[in-house]
Image (spheres, grey):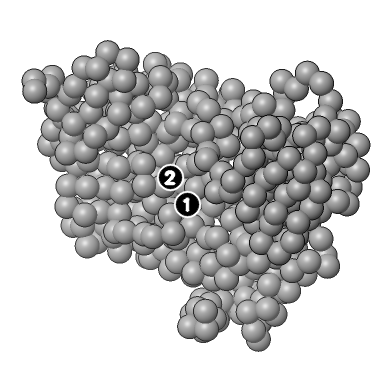
């Protein structure tokens, strides 16, 4: 079979947020050529099939590519994010990535872009519309941005059986409902389940008409503690200092979670239900209060069968009817239960190197690729921060990030890069502190004093799980 031959220094598989963030740094910091292959018709990855009312759940300032701002720089004046910095909508994010491609990447003359193409492996890919086949050659590296597999409701296959005739839809369909159902049954307790419930409440659905099936309650992060400016220093850096202090002072793993909740680092939906899940979902306190209006919450484990008149779960069953709308929010956003070295010869597999920030991680990995020569050194700098699932994964997740942060702090070149990269907002916040501000300086001292004791305690707890 004859293939068209494509050559570039870097072959990037995937033009989602991770692939775009990686390419942006390579384009900015090297003279390398890049070919980007993606199955979607435009950049943005899963944002192309996201539900219509999706937004970022952390401030826009932390998202996108390093060279181009996404945030409006404004705080929301209305809604459940009131008083906090803007959260870009899915449409805004999608348009943003398309503009980065059209206005920055392609005009550079160093980027080739192949949308609507399925990557088959070994450099081969095929155009899904024309059937044309290609053989690509990477002179330096291939970057596999598909390893952090993103699952979205519109393309997700539920892991439970569904009887014929059940009114079952992804939350993508909520804005297109023409007739009100008897009630809404939201299946899934993660971020998409939260978004579905908040959307229904925002549109005046009676909370008593919503039944929320939560297989596991989750520890949640307070969005106020993620704000990108000095104005929120006591919340953001204060939360990190409180986190380290809580970990360092804990006697047991249970005690650690209790302390993290008491100091305001963690939130939970129901004070009487102990969370067993942690995915790093971020929520505002106003959103949490709104969700607590929903009283009909089912905690019988995972759904096994969705029938016309009853739903069978791991630990029980509940009644339903053909007149109820069942909203699928059971997809897991990102998962990588297994990890692998990021740098392996001619292959780079981007994963998280900083907690909660996949796009920053991709940009950082690209910088390390550009600035360092040895794979061993690169992997030492880019230790994988494994994505969490159950509550105790927080221990491995946090200790891995703290180890990375310490390594970076010992390298002046990396410190300079971090300070100058817009995706690393906290460096600027700390640098802007007035040394005569006793309150802020005390927070920084608490953070420094508790960092190493927290690491030691995390290592102790990690040995117990």
Gap in angstroms between the C-alphas marked 1 and 2:
6 Å
**Sequence-earlier tag: 1 or 2:** 2
The quadrant in which residue 210 appears is: top right
> Is residue 163 rendered to the left or right of residue 377?
right
Q: Which residue is mark 1?
A: 335
Side of 184 relative to 152 (left or right)? right
Q: Which residue is mark 2?
A: 149
In the picture, residue 336 is in which quadrant?
A: bottom left
Residue 94 falls left or right of residue 364: right
Residue with the most extreme top position: 130
Q: Is residue 286 visible?
A: no
Crowding at mark 1 (Cα within 10 Å: few <14, some 14-19, many 20+)? some
Which percent across, then down, holds residue 340? Answer: 31, 59
Closest to the observer: 154 or 410? 154
Percent x, y of residue 263: 75, 68
The kind of secondary structure element at disc 2 is strand
């Amino acid at each position: 079979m004859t293939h068209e031959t494509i050559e570039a220094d870097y072959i990037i598989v995937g033009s989602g947020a991770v692939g775009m963030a990686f390419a942006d740094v390579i384009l900015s910091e090297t003279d390398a050529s890049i070919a980007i292959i993606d199955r979607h018709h435009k950049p943005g990855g899963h944002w192309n099939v996201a539900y219509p009312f999706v937004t970022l759940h952390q401030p826009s300032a932390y998202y996108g590519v390093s060279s181009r701002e996404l945030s409006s720089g404004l705080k929301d004046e209305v809604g459940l994010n009131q008083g906090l910095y803007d959260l870009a909508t899915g449409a805004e994010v999608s348009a943003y990535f398309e503009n980065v491609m059209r206005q920055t990447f392609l005009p550079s003359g160093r980027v080739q872009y192949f949308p609507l193409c399925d990557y088959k492996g070994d450099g081969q890919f095929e155009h899904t519309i024309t059937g044309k086949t290609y053989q690509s050659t990477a002179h330096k590296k291939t970057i596999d941005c598909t390893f952090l597999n993103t699952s979205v409701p519109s393309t997700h296959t539920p892991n439970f059986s569904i009887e014929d005739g059940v009114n079952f839809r992804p939350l993508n369909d909520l804005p297109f409902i023409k007739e009100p159902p008897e009630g809404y049954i939201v299946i899934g307790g993660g971020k998409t389940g939260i978004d579905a419930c908040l959307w229904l409440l925002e549109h005046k659905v009676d909370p008593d008409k919503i039944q929320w099936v939560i297989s596991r309650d989750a520890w949640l992060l307070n969005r106020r503690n993620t704000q990108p400016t000095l104005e929120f220093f006591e919340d953001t850096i204060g939360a990190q200092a409180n986190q380290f202090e809580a970990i360092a002072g804990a006697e047991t793993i249970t005690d650690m979670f209790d302390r993290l909740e008491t100091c305001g680092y963690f939130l939970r939906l129901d004070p009487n239900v102990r969370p067993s899940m942690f995915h790093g979902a971020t929520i505002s306190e106003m959103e949490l209060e709104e969700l607590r209006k929903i009283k009909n919450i089912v905690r019988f484990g995972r759904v096994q069968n969705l029938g016309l008149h009853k739903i069978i779960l791991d630990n029980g069953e509940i009644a339903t009817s053909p007149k109820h709308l069942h909203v699928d929010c059971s997809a897991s956003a990102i998962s990588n239960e297994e990890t692998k070295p990021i740098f392996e010869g001619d292959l780079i597999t981007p994963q998280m190197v900083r907690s909660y920030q996949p796009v920053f991680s991709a940009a950082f990995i690209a910088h390390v690729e550009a600035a360092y020569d040895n794979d061993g050194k690169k992997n030492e700098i880019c230790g994988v921060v494994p994505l969490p699932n159950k509550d105790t994964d927080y221990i491995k997740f946090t200790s891995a990030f703290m180890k990375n942060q310490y390594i970076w702090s010992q390298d002046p070149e990396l410190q300079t890069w971090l300070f100058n990269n817009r995706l690393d907002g906290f460096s600027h916040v700390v640098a802007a502190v007035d040394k005569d501000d006793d309150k802020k300086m005390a927070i920084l001292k608490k953070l420094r004093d508790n960092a190493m004791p927290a690491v030691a305690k995390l290592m102790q707890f990690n040995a117990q799980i």
